[in-house]
Image: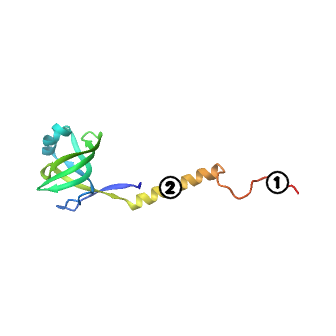
């Protein structure tokens, strides 16, 4: 199902449920610790939360955002991240308002295209009737 998503801050001290798509802001200690495996300029890690145990989080990484704005796409590689390497945790949620607005705009655009091309029939061919 396609839709518009937003990243919402997780409740302070409470990590989202396992299976949720999360974004994790990485601090300087995290950049240093994870730099060998993920690169030295990590700003944020996004992926599905697989497990949380003993202050460590296992994430199936889908994207890594770098400090200079670049994005590296990953294909679900599992990475173990300690809580002390993070500054903020976000949960990816469906934005109902944005999804409805996008759907309405798409439907309106398709309808306008069909009407402008005369692709929606009115039931008559437009040919005159000859008695």
Give neighbour class at mark 2: few <14, some 14-19, many 20+ (Cα, 10 Å): few
Where residue 95 appears, x then y in whole percent? 37, 59
User: Residue 43, located in which quarter of the rendered image?
Assistant: top left
- Horizontally, residue 36 falls left or right of residue 91, namely left
Give neighbour class at mark 1: few <14, some 14-19, many 20+ (Cα, 10 Å): few
Where residue 48 appears, x then y in whole percent? 26, 52
Spatial CA span between label 2 and label 1:
37 Å
Front of the two marks 2 and 1? 1
Mark carried by residue 128: 1
Q: Which of pointers 2 and 1 lies earlier in the amino acid sequence?
A: 2
Mark carried by residue 22: none
Of residues 2 and 78, the one drawn nearer to the viewer in this rendering? 78
Mark carried by residue 105: 2
Residue occupying the point 64% across, 48% down: 117
Residue occupying the point 59% across, 50% down: 113
* Vertical placement of residue 12 versus 109, above or below: below
């Amino acid at each position: 199902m396609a839709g518009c998503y937003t990243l919402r801050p997780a409740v302070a001290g409470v990590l989202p449920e396992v299976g949720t798509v999360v974004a994790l802001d990485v601090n300087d200690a995290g950049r240093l610790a994870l730099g060998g495996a993920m690169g030295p300029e990590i700003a944020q890690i996004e992926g599905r939360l697989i497990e949380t145990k003993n202050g460590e989080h296992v994430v199936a990484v889908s994207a890594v955002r770098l400090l200079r704005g670049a994005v590296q796409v990953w294909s679900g590689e599992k990475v173990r991240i300690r809580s002390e390497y993070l500054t903020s945790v976000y949960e990816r949620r469906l934005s109902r308002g944005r999804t409805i607005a996008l759907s309405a705009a798409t439907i309106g655009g398709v309808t306008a295209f069909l009407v402008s091309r005369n692709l929606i029939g009115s039931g008559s061919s437009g040919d005159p009737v000859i008695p």
